Image (tube, rainbow, N blue to C red):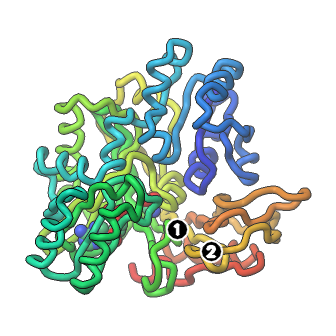
Amino acid sequence: MNVLLLGSGGRESALAWKMSQSPLLDQLFIAPGNPGMKAYGTCVSVDWKDREALSHFCTAENIDMVVIGPEDPLVAGLADFFEENPALSHIHVIGPKAAAAQLEGSKDFSKQFMERNKIPTAGHRTFTASQLEEAKQYLTTIDAPYVLKADGLAAGKGVLIIDNLAEALHEMDAMLGGKFGSASSKVVVEEFLDGIEFSVFVLTDGQDYMLMPEAKDYKRIGEGDTGLNTGGMGAVSPVPFVDAEVKKEVLLHIIEPTIKGLKHEQMDYVGFIFFGLILTKKGVKVIEYNCRMGDPETEVVIPRVDEDLLPLFVDAAKKKLLTRPMAQTAHAACTVMQVSGGYPEAYPKGHVIKGLEEHVEGTVVFHAGTAEKDGKIVTNGGRVLCATGIASNAAQALTQAYNRLDQITFEGAYRRNDIGVDL
Ligand code: AMP
Ligand code: GLY
């Protein structure tokens, strides 16, 4: 089978690492990929936005399957493009159609979906620009903290949690006034939920689903969960507080009704669903859906998957998936991100990365923001790379991951040294 994977981050590195081990794989192409992914396949400079080039590439290389890593192409309708194009419609696409990707692409859509399907989530109201005064009036009737969310995709920056009313009113003005462009033409105001966050993932064909290992992500830049939000500074799997009882609640009240809802509402969904969840005093609630895997969650979830992904992808694309848990190892996996100094604000690029040739038993390094320059591997993003440790317990997995990162240096490198210590 010839597979084209779209994306270039740590998530796609982990997916490429896994798929490259499949006996069903003939060729793996990655567009655009990164230097670390060259170990798993052939990186090609095809831009998914250039549909003519993408279409030519798929035909020329006899691509049988396209795996779409990030959300942007999904929300923009790339899966629909393959199905609607007679020359490409035989290709299995892993990733939902645009209408179903709205579960991530529009917060208002996902809140309405959850309400219709009685899935536990924070209470909410949605406002458009013409309802600015009503929105501000509403804010004066509720208590802090105020949770304001841009409806559309805003590169992870569209959620604001604000402690005082004056600032919330000001932000409401700014957001409905176009702070995030068309993404904030609607603003969702949510009830604040207090609790501990974790994520679960399924692979689905829109009718059946396979439960994958759960994960916990560390979003803040600073140790002790302080400072600015990032894309994620590290992750662990399994998550100790996600015990059998919590899992049962998630399956019964969240995953099952979501899959039933997709089916009932005839949403064409082939791919991963990422359930961003929070364990509150009143039970588990959904914070958000994503129509893709998480990053860095994938870097711990995928190493714990103990079966070949490619046959499962084929079954999903053919809508023949069976509802069962995905086989998983008893190992723990922990990943730690090494980021550029300054991230998540401005940071330099182009620093040479040293120590990549070293090795620590039971670790895998996944590249995220790296590039090649004059034969050297250099930094090319905020999140540069991560090391995943895999061991019989989380403490050992973390030790391995940190030992591996100790070997890898570049100017300004930063990481959190407290990943997993709270668990
Ligand atoms: P989202 O993009 O919707 O996942 O929101 C980003 C982050 O904001 C989440 O991971 C939470 O940490 C936080 N958050 C979002 N919604 C709420 C809420 N209703 N209550 C408390 N925290 C929230
Ligand atoms: N790590 C959070 C995400 O992938 O959305």
Badge 1 residue CB within 8 Å of ligand 2 = no
Front-most of 383 and 240? 383
Q: Is residue 313 left or right of residue 126?
A: right
Q: Quadrant of ligand 1?
A: bottom left
Looking at the image, which residue is at 26% across and 60% down?
Answer: 187
Front-most of 73 and 302? 73
Which quarter shows the N terminus?
top right
- At label 1, counting other C-alpha atoms closer than 10 Å, the crowd grade (few under 14, some 14-19, many 20 or more) is many
Residue 353 appears in the figure: no
Tell me the residue that label 1 is attached to. 334
SS type, badge 1:
strand
Which quarter shows the C terminus?
bottom left
Residue 412, given in percent of the width and then of the height, sits at: 72, 81
What amino acid is found at the position of numbered circle 1 in the picture?
A: Cys
Q: Is residue 277 left or right of residue 305?
A: left
Front-most of 234 and 190? 190
Tell me the residue that label 2 is attached to. 346
Contact (Cβ within 8 Å) of mark 2 with mark 1: no
Cα–Cα span, label 2 and label 1:
27 Å
Looking at the image, which residue is at 48% across and 29% down?
Answer: 93
What amino acid is found at the position of numbered circle 2 in the picture?
A: Ala
- In the displayed orientation, state which residue is furthest to the left: 141
Which is in the foreground here, disc 2 or disc 1?
2
Residue 120, given in percent of the width and then of the height, sits at: 15, 58
Residue 104, given in percent of the width and then of the height, sits at: 35, 49
Q: Which callout, 2 or 1, points at the residue further toward the start of the chain?
A: 1
Looking at the image, which residue is at 69% across and 65% down?
Answer: 361
Image quadrant where residue 57 sits: top right
SS type, badge 2:
loop
Looking at the image, which residue is at 43% across and 27% down?
Answer: 80
Q: Is residue 1 left or right of residue 259?
A: right
